[in-house]
Amino acid sequence: MDANGKVVGAVPGKPNNWGRWGEDDQRGTANLLTAECAQAGAALVRRGAVFSLGLPIGHGAPNIGTRSEPLHLVRRATADQVVGDTDHLGIESSDDLVVLALQASTQLDGHGHFAHEHTFYNGYWSGLMTAGQGARRLGIHHQAGGIVGRGVLLDVARHADLDPFNGAITAAMLDEVAAAHGVEIRPGDIVLVRTGWLGTWLSEPDTRRRRRQAGLTLDTIDWLAAHDVAMIAADNKTVEAVPGPEDQPILSWHIGALRDLGLLVGELFDLDALSDDCAADGVYEFLFSTAPLPIVNAVGSPLNPLVVK
Amino acid sequence: MDANGKVVGAVPGKPNNWGRWGEDDQRGTANLLTAECAQAGAALVRRGAVFSLGLPIGHGAPNIGTRSEPLHLVRRATADQVVGDTDHLGIESSDDLVVLALQASTQLDGHGHFAHEHTFYNGYWSGLMTAGQGARRLGIHHQAGGIVGRGVLLDVARHADLDPFNGAITAAMLDEVAAAHGVEIRPGDIVLVRTGWLGTWLSEPDTRRRRRQAGLTLDTIDWLAAHDVAMIAADNKTVEAVPGPEDQPILSWHIGALRDLGLLVGELFDLDALSDDCAADGVYEFLFSTAPLPIVNAVGSPLNPLVVK
Amino acid sequence: MDANGKVVGAVPGKPNNWGRWGEDDQRGTANLLTAECAQAGAALVRRGAVFSLGLPIGHGAPNIGTRSEPLHLVRRATADQVVGDTDHLGIESSDDLVVLALQASTQLDGHGHFAHEHTFYNGYWSGLMTAGQGARRLGIHHQAGGIVGRGVLLDVARHADLDPFNGAITAAMLDEVAAAHGVEIRPGDIVLVRTGWLGTWLSEPDTRRRRRQAGLTLDTIDWLAAHDVAMIAADNKTVEAVPGPEDQPILSWHIGALRDLGLLVGELFDLDALSDDCAADGVYEFLFSTAPLPIVNAVGSPLNPLVVK
Amino acid sequence: MDANGKVVGAVPGKPNNWGRWGEDDQRGTANLLTAECAQAGAALVRRGAVFSLGLPIGHGAPNIGTRSEPLHLVRRATADQVVGDTDHLGIESSDDLVVLALQASTQLDGHGHFAHEHTFYNGYWSGLMTAGQGARRLGIHHQAGGIVGRGVLLDVARHADLDPFNGAITAAMLDEVAAAHGVEIRPGDIVLVRTGWLGTWLSEPDTRRRRRQAGLTLDTIDWLAAHDVAMIAADNKTVEAVPGPEDQPILSWHIGALRDLGLLVGELFDLDALSDDCAADGVYEFLFSTAPLPIVNAVGSPLNPLVVK
């Protein structure tokens, strides 16, 4: 490790963005989100319809087993004051608190979330992410400046009648869906892929024990790189199809997306209301904006992303 | 209390919005945020410059004594894998968690946060906000759909050289500052008031024990109602001046804003970079967008609000 | 409510200990634990064999649905230092934290845990137990002085081959088991009842969804009062049989034990190793000692109780 | 590291107990707590007077800066039911939860708490204590079986009028105090040393910012080893004097006690009431009993230790 926290001689996969925005870069494809992207996104607003893509926190959510359920706890309730538990100031107020796994619901993956061969994006050493200090490099606060630009929905589920558990979404399928929607993918775009998995999870509780999940295949890494996509998000747990190819490391797409490309990756986005609207008006591009909580040295953040059409 | 959770015969202060958006309304002035507001906000984007107004979480923040400091905790560190603590799948990843008071940093106050005479906004009974179930009425999730519209900065601190500890910002002063900035306040606006308090807190640690705080006076309630402002936020802990008038209940402005008007109220917004930019280009109106975490039945939410100019 | 927090005119069930140790008493049957009890308990130590009755925390435990699983979180790991994350002092140390429901494992119920008709033990008003201040009366810290005395095991499961899910343990059965063990119950005793339920839960995961549970019947309240038992504990979730009688309020035994008698009640005690030892040497009386964590105004506490034979 | 988690060729300091109780031992001097110790302790009970040595949790406690204050949180309050928030079963009950740094109050240090040259007690590799799995060796649950035996109070503060901030307690001073008290130290003893620091902290808030602290000097490590003491505890934060010798690593006593000897170490024990009693009756030996919470793989545990005289 050098003085900057980088592993000397570390080798990224292909394609990759290591060094592209400087040896010290900790923002990855957020660098693609130029002022022009924000302008272009805002210019897409026509009707002023706003869509929120965040799942409710506290009603149960799809979650991997190692993350605890969110706990919402009340420090002081106005019911307290109704029964006479008032402070000397006579204020009637409530206050609350959460114990929240940062990736337990709709979320942004930070670049300190995934490593391979003990290196993160841009060659930072994964040993710098510790219990005591969190992600000393690539913390989610490096993305706190916000993610604003042109969003595009690729509604694969609606277009292709995808099996939410076994559907494999290839680069060719993304191109096909984009063509069907009449949109092209441009540098700096925020691409939202609808697999249908989340809607099925929400509406069909009997399916919740199924481990398989429709998602992107490994060849989409090249597609994302070739299009200089700034952010990719989906309505499933991992964006990528699970399980992945048998001859690859598990969650290989995560390695390619987070560690090699430094992509912004969003998970558990609720795209169903947006899908209905896009199907109705035929418009699949819009203003997208969100920002993680600026938790210093965190590896992920809950999000409540907004789309404006 | 009637079957809907409302106190029969409850009397709001003046001015108020009780009943204005229906007897069952739980969104307050969020109802003013029409599609036209979102359109108008987006139309203000010129340069595509994005400003994030959220304070870092974890570097210390101004906080009232009863709220605990945020705890950022690591469930699994990539350093673990460096020393050989890998699971059977060989994944190199990290995962984290926060214990977070929902109003410990940049935040949105929900309408279940403040009551008076045991009633909330629109006449709901404050006894419905309990330890066991949280805010069964007026939970922050009712605002989860997002807050998007025209934002206006009223940079009182820069205009008036306000004392950050004793400055009293009256309705007349807001009008004066708006006039100086060349902006008018329109229905559905999101008004950001800069007092200078937060910048002083951040840059002058010696002042942190001071309890007094510049902010809005009680007469601004009429001003906010008259202009049909949708959201008011400031760079201090309570928006309102502390202490308030001696002959009024403590935090009376909160009662008027949250309980009577059902206003959206934001606190601890970091407005300093935005202030510099507005002073430089003379443009004090912009696109504002944010959304609370959709925590079911919560009374507040951390925010990382975005401005696009 | 009077100035002391008591409900004027409140009526306890029968039998009860209200007023027995003073109008202000907040300790209930802990008052029965005299110095003589501690002496008598210590005098029972023969071999010096120590048994711990606490379940491991973190390997899964029987738990009612509303209590969250314990979270053990590491603030600083020695693995951090192995990978070079050392502070300026060079200390190699670790530190940890729990998010722990106080009744999620082996535990002591406090007297603020259960009310009936809005009164607690000794007539205190249950409205004094709030989100903001916890149990302002009858907090678990009133038991912090320790529970030390003569313990007696009544091994109903071994004696009677009880069905762990449907077994009803009556007062007559307690007498029968005591007689079989050759022990008598004396004032101030700590009585441990083994139902066999916990061992079944631990060894037969397939049974874990069953809601029914062997335990004490309602007539044991009279028995506990008549014998002036200081503490009752069992190897199940609620001591009492679930479900209870159809014509009674749910968990009526809890009302009788906690609210009327002010009994010390222990739950999820692991009695299996002790049971084996007692069966082997025929000695069912011993020194018992434990103490709750002195959490101010808490309603329960985890325990790791000790028996010495 | 070998297959058992031990560092090949690791060298302990002198004196040490590495290997003494087997290569696989994870209990350290808990091995000295034989059945005879428990018998001997119980035999010391005369009056049946019980003393609890745990500080209240939630009223403020001396704490090192990196540990968060305990948070006591209410999940369900009986006040909720008073205002009508009852579940369908009509139960009136409360439930609570803590967010608790395991070493934030009266506590037991586990052997995974302190390392030196990346080895723990008995040569285990300190890299086995990770964020993801906690202390995979030497977890506090290895001490869950309980600590029961003969306790001895060495009331240095009362005997020597020690400066609570600068007092250095040497081995010779321990001998002197023992002689004055008329007690000898025997193998397997639990030795409680009163420095007076905690009482000063509690009664003189103005002194709380002082960093210095009376405590044991480094030569007491030999004394503890020579006497085969099973557990040492004190009424200060670290047992040892702070700061220690300038020419030694910081907290060197901890290295000697925890890592070399595998000692049980207790901190923040409240010894003042016990001190008064011993001074009154001249008896400085007694039954001591306590047990950590059996949190799997934890490095420390809160304690509420009991003494019976």
Image (cartoon, coloured by chain):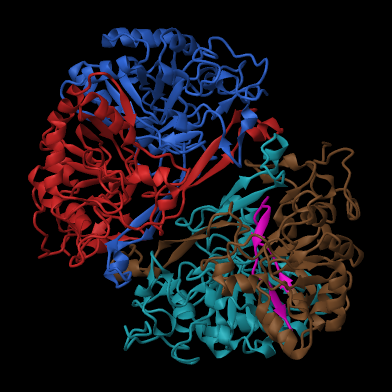
Chain colours: A blue, B red, C cyan, D brown
Q: Is residue C273 toward the left or the right of residue B144 in the image?
A: right
Q: Is residue C71 above or below residue A134?
A: below
Q: Quadrant of residue B295?
A: top left
Q: Is residue D226 covered in magenta?
A: no
Answer yes or no: is residue C262 visible.
yes
Q: Main secondary structure of the magenta part?
A: loop
Q: Is residue C60 above or below residue C228?
A: above
* Nearer-the-camera pick, A104 or C232: A104
Q: Is residue D292 covered in magenta?
A: yes
* Nearer-the-camera pick, C150 or D199: D199
Where does residue C86 sit, x and y in percent of width and height?
68, 40
* Nearer-the-camera pick, C28 or D185: D185
Q: Is residue B305 toward the left or the right of residue D59 in the image?
A: left
Where does residue C61 sit, x and y in percent of width and height?
58, 56
Answer yes or no: is residue B308 visible.
no
Q: Residue at x 88, y 80 (%)?
A: D179
Q: Is residue C72 above or below residue C309?
A: above
| Position of the C terminus of chain B by quadrant | top left
Where does residue A201 sit, x and y in percent of width and height?
39, 34
Q: Residue furthest front?
A: B161
Q: Residue at x 53, y 74 (%)?
A: C141
Where does residue D245 sit, x and y in percent of width and height?
79, 55
Q: How many marks?
A: 0
The magenta-colored residue range is D289-309
Q: Residue at x 32, y 87 (%)?
A: C8
| Position of the N terminus of chain B by quadrant | bottom left
Q: Is residue D110 toward the left or the right of residue C299 in the image?
A: right
